[in-house]
Amino acid sequence: MWIASTARYAPLATAIAQAMESPCIGLERYAFPDGELYHRLTDNLTGADVALIGGTATDADTLELFDLACGLVHEQVRGLVVIIPYYGYSTMERAVRRGEVVKASTRARLLSAIPPPRGRFEFVFLDLHSEGIPYYLATAASCTHLYAKPLVVEAARRLGGADFVLAATDAGRAKWVESLANDLGVESAFVYKRRSSGHDTALTGVNAEVAGRRVVIYDDMIRTGGSLVQAAQAYRARGASQLYAVATHLVLPPGAKTRLRESGLFERVVGTDSLPQAREQADDFLEVVSLAGLLADYLRGRLLW
């Protein structure tokens, strides 16, 4: 299986290729003076099976993923697996007010326009914020929702030690966290929230005893860190001795990591490299683990086509 990627996902793609002992597709890429991007696939890919890795964190990332997928099919690859470690339009996955544009749907429509290869065609998503996203794709491709559970479990055990509480930021993630806590053999907890006015919410309580114990808070993504800090304050107010955070997607716009560090609440934050900017911000406070092994294991199972 050949490995290809968009520019920003090249480090992850290289790590996957090394784990699988697979070749990376040669790619010429540069920008014209007007900003238009030039791409040229330099290998003969006729009849090849290809895994293409690229997220949709920005519109530019999405368009490059679309262009490369179309180019690969034009080069007559046999099978194509499009791996999207982070689907960046989950926030607008449905309309609440009249006139709102559902970006999760419009971007899925764009990806649905990728022509199918003559063999297997698959989209792979990782820890989607909204699990219904794959149903927006109107395509002959199959869709797989892959979970980063093995990485989350390993990180939680390493941070929590022998006895800890696995916690959620709110009741909305409580069922998933409770299931994960059962697998880990630990207690689960979540905070109660009440909408006070407009978009503001107030924390009203914690459902479990956390006094004197380590608490590992899990959420699928960390954006600005506001909800995470609020939840951590609630657990600390109830006597938690140490607080850690684990998330699959580290969006972390400018200032978010600083906010988490300067809150003084967390010993460490752990996430994956599903977004390229996560690796760029890694340090002694923010630990970033690679998805390469997880994705390589999945792709090995797809070699029997």
Image: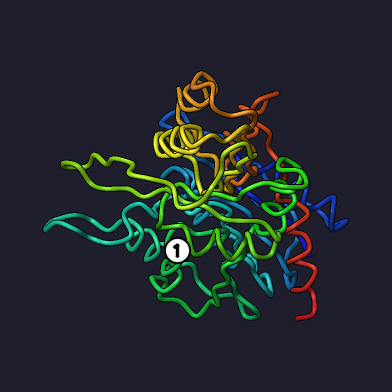
Looking at the image, the residue that sits furthest to the right is 21
Local SS, label 1: helix
Residue drawn at x 60%, y 47% is 274
Picture coordinates of residue 69, whole percent (x, y): 56, 60
Does residue 43 sit above or below 298 in this rendering? above
Residue drawn at x 64%, y 42% is 273
Looking at the image, residue 240 sits to the left or right of residue 153; the answer is: left
Picture coordinates of residue 110, whole percent (x, y): 39, 62
The quadrant in which the C terminus is found is: bottom right
The answer to which image quadrant residue 46 occupies is bottom right
Picture coordinates of residue 207, whole percent (x, y): 45, 52
Q: Is residue 74 visible?
A: no
Picture coordinates of residue 172, whole percent (x, y): 40, 58
Callout 1: few (<14), some (14-19), or many (20+) C-alpha neighbours within 10 Å? Answer: many
> Which residue in the structure is indicated by mark 1?
111
Give the tally of numbered discs.
1
Q: Is residue 79 visible?
A: yes
Give, as a three-letter code, the residue at label 1. Answer: Leu
Residue drawn at x 50%, y 80% is 140
Residue 292 or residue 114, whichever sits in front:
292
Looking at the image, residue 41 sits to the left or right of residue 201; the answer is: right
